[in-house]
Image (cartoon, helix red, strand yellow):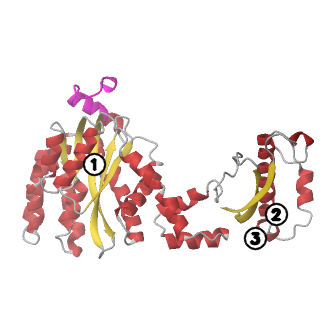
Amino acid sequence: MTIDPKLLDELLVDYKRPEDIIGENGLLKQLTKALLERALNAELTEHVGYDKHDPAGYNSGNSRNGATKKKLKGDFGEIELETPRDRNGSFEPEIVSKGQTRFSGFDDKIISMYSRGMTTREIEGHLKEMYGVDVSPTLISNVTEAVMEEVKTWQSRPLDDVYPILYMDALRVKVRDGAPIQNKAIHVAIAVNLAGHKEVLGLWAAQNEGAKFWLQVLTELQNRGVKDIFIACVDGLKGFPEVIESVYPKAEVQTCIVHMVRASLSYVNWKQRKKVGADLRKIYQAATADDASEQLDVFAQNWDAECPVVSQIWRRHWDRITPFLAYPADIRKVIYTTNAVESLNMSLRKIIKMRGSFPNEEAALKLLYLALRNASKKWTMPVQNWTAALNRFSILWPDRMPAAERV
């Protein structure tokens, strides 16, 4: 549809300043009000079957019955509309429905700001500053609360039969919940599916991270349809590998190298961390498991006098550290978590830090879900070197690959 330039010229005849168009009582706002009311009256005409003041409406069984005033919030600010009524009360307008107080897309703006870590007070102030709209904290809470139904549906959705790689980690959040602030654990399960795309399988809140709770998570994944996992990448939580193997006996458990390095450096003087990190890199970038073992011995000789705990940590977890070393270098990055998950976790932690604390667990889950939904919009490509990794899996475990994926 093209608007006649002559009509535009006529509308702009008194234009002198930008405020005349986009200001509080500018042309844009007046046009929005006029067009909406015109459309509402056209809908009512369609509903009752005759034009306003048309004699055909006499004794028709239904008639116009004045109008109701309502305020509508949107990008244009707030306008007052006159919504026409019919005497029978059967008119259901479409362009601005009954009970609607916000223009289409306005709720999405609130949710978008909330998902980026803005508090209710910050959203309220931003909407006032940007659009001149007064929005109550209750309205913002109601809009974001509606997301919880979406979270519940998402959390119970059916999953694929097979996920080649599963990453499991927990994030700490501060929750008030009517009591002194407590640290709680939000458990996150992120998988790479057979197409090579990352997929968040779920979020679970608990008082603490523990192997026993992860058993519940894995059992839930199994009940939602996950029959097999090739490689599970986890942190060094005690008992975690055994829990995974109890649910998925064929899964290969890989301790996350990023977590290992982070845990190791916590025992090192900050002045020495760069050197220690470089020497640890020689271990996990070794060509083979045997070479890695030799590099660990060298590391112990160089550093045990100053920080003996580091080599002990690596030896204690050695059987869970080395599985990824059986793969070519270009596939290792897919497995040991750095590229696939760590950047996502960093963005989630940043949002958690911005919020400080949450009133309850639901608020934390709601925000993290929205943040993950935003992040997943960028997951349009398979993880790097996925074709090579999938071919390798097909050779190693041909009987576990779905028929359509077998080499």
For the record, the magenta segment spans 390-407
| Image mark for residue 27 | 2
Residue lying at 51% horizontally and 61% vertically, measured from the top left: 142
Above/below status of 322 relative to 350: above
Q: Residue 43: x percent and y percent? A: 77, 45
**Would you place residue 220 above or below residue 403 in this image?**
below
Using a 10 Å C-alpha cutoff, classify the residue at mark 3 as few (fewer than 14 neighbours), some (14 to 19) or many (20 or more). some
Query: Which residue, given by chain and number where applicable, does mark 3 sit on?
Result: 24
> Between tags 2 and 1, which lies in front?
2
How crowded pointer 1 is (Cα within 10 Å; few <14, some 14-19, many 20+) is rated as: many
Q: Nearer the viewer, residue 154 or 112?
A: 154
Note whether residue 332 is visible: no
Q: Are marks 3 and 1 in contact (CB under 8 Å)?
A: no
Distance (Cα) linking label 2 and label 1: 54 Å
- The secondary element bearing badge 3 is classed as loop
Identity of the amino acid at label 1? Tyr
Q: Mark 3 to mark 1: distance in Å?
A: 51 Å
The residue labelled by disc 1 is 167
- Residue 396 in the magenta stretch? The answer is yes
**Kind of residue sitting beneath label 2:** Leu
Instruction: Please tell me which residue is depicted at 87% across the width and 47% down the height of the picture.
Output: 52
Specify the quadrant that holds the C terminus.
Answer: top left
- Tell me where residue 103 appears, x and y as whole percent: 66, 56
Residue 191 placed where, x, y %?
32, 44
Q: Depth check: give the residue in front, 387 or 193.
A: 193
What quarter of the picture does the N terminus occupy? Answer: top right
